[in-house]
Amino acid sequence: MKEYNQYSSFEGSQHRAGHSRRDILKYGSAAALGAIMANGAISNAHAQGKSVTLSGHAPDALDQGNNTGEFDSNEPLNILIVNYDGGTLLDFAGPSEIFHRIPNTNVRYASLNGGNVILEFGVVYGKTERLADIEKTDLILVPGGSNLSVPMQPEYLKQIRRLADGAKYVTSVCNGSLVLAATGILKGKRSACHWAFINKLSEYGAIPVPDRFVEDDNGRFMSGGGVTAGIDFALRVAAKLRGLQAAEVAQLAIEYDPAPPFHSGHPREARPEIIAMVDKQLPGASKGLARIPGVR
């Protein structure tokens, strides 16, 4: 998995800062908490030769003090999430949780024929709208799934492409980017995907990028990596469209403060024997070329 080793672990840098959330329980004031976090951030940034702001945070692309976003706070934001049989619940449940918590935002769910869809593992998700009944949307999100044979059908692709062409933002999570790519709209565009399927994107003319969040055309195209990356993706979308403050409020409200118990969430960190076991389940996964039902 040498192609993934160049991407560093953010979680690892946080552990090296020297303070865990559990340590903070020993301190009794917000001032002490702020001092601990600021000192940790400053020390870590200095160790890496980075500049820091007075707040103690290393500069970030999103941390520019701009809380306005691309959509005015009084302007409704319409988001459409595409559903289908075989889809993965968390691919859209994570983003949905964020989107519902940002101001003046309307989230809709649709499938080809409307009604219930049977997701991965037999989970029934109900009362979706018909794609054909939706005239347009500001943002379309195509989540991934363990079986893409349904959304890869010509009529599904036709409806997704129609709505994507009229949308201001075209997005995906996990291997949902393969569905978008199959419509042709990602030709020549950079896109994320689940690590096991990332290199399938090039077969549709898209440019595979093994990152957790990827954007192209000044953010018109935004995509998240595999499954859990959908939450990171949605927070970045929220910050871009509604401003940093709205995204941070949503993040705090759902207590999105991940601390994975094992460092095996990506091939760049997982032990070789774990990667080998996944390769047996998904042949070609370690090369980003795993086959999935419905993908030509």
Image (spheres, grey):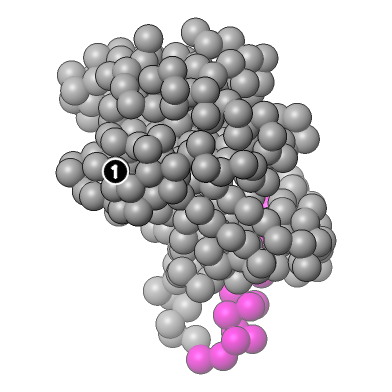
Q: Residue at x 54, y 56 (%)?
A: 107
In this view of the protein, can residue 198 be seen by the observer?
no
Reading the image, the residue beneath label 1 is 117
Q: Quadrant of residue 287?
A: top left
State left or right for residue 194 relative to residue 294.
right
Query: Magenta span has 29?
Result: yes
Classify 10 Å Cα crowding around label 1: few (below 14), some (14-19), many (20 and above): many
Quarter holding the N terminus is top left
Residue 204 in the image: x percent, y percent?
Answer: 53, 11
Quadrant location of the C terminus? top left
Q: Position of residue 180 (x, y in %)?
A: 52, 25
Closer to us: 4 or 213: 213
Residue at screen point 32% across, 18% down: 294
Q: Magenta stretch containing residue 134, yes or no? A: no
Q: How many numbered marks have been drawn onto this rendered protein structure?
A: 1
Q: Name the dominant secondary structure of the magenta segment.
A: helix
**Amino acid type indicated by mark 1:** Val
Q: Return the residue nearer the eye: 179 or 273.
A: 179
Q: Residue at x 23, y 26 (%)?
A: 278
| Residue 52 vertical position relative to residue 164 in the rendered view, above or below | below
Which residue is the extreme one toward the bottom?
28
Residue 293 visible at all: yes
Q: Position of residue 123 (x, y in %)?
A: 22, 48
- Residue interval drawn in magenta: 28-45
Whether residue 53 is situated above or below residue 8 in the rendered picture? below
Q: Quadrant of residue 279?
A: top left
- In front of the other: 171 or 3: 171
279 vs 75, left or right, is: left
Which residue is rendered at x = 52% and y = 42% of the image?
Answer: 133
From the viewer's perspective, tell me whether residue 50 is left or right of residue 177. right
Q: Position of residue 97 (x, y in %)?
A: 46, 61
In the rendered structure, the answer to whether residue 116 lies left or right of residue 114 reads left
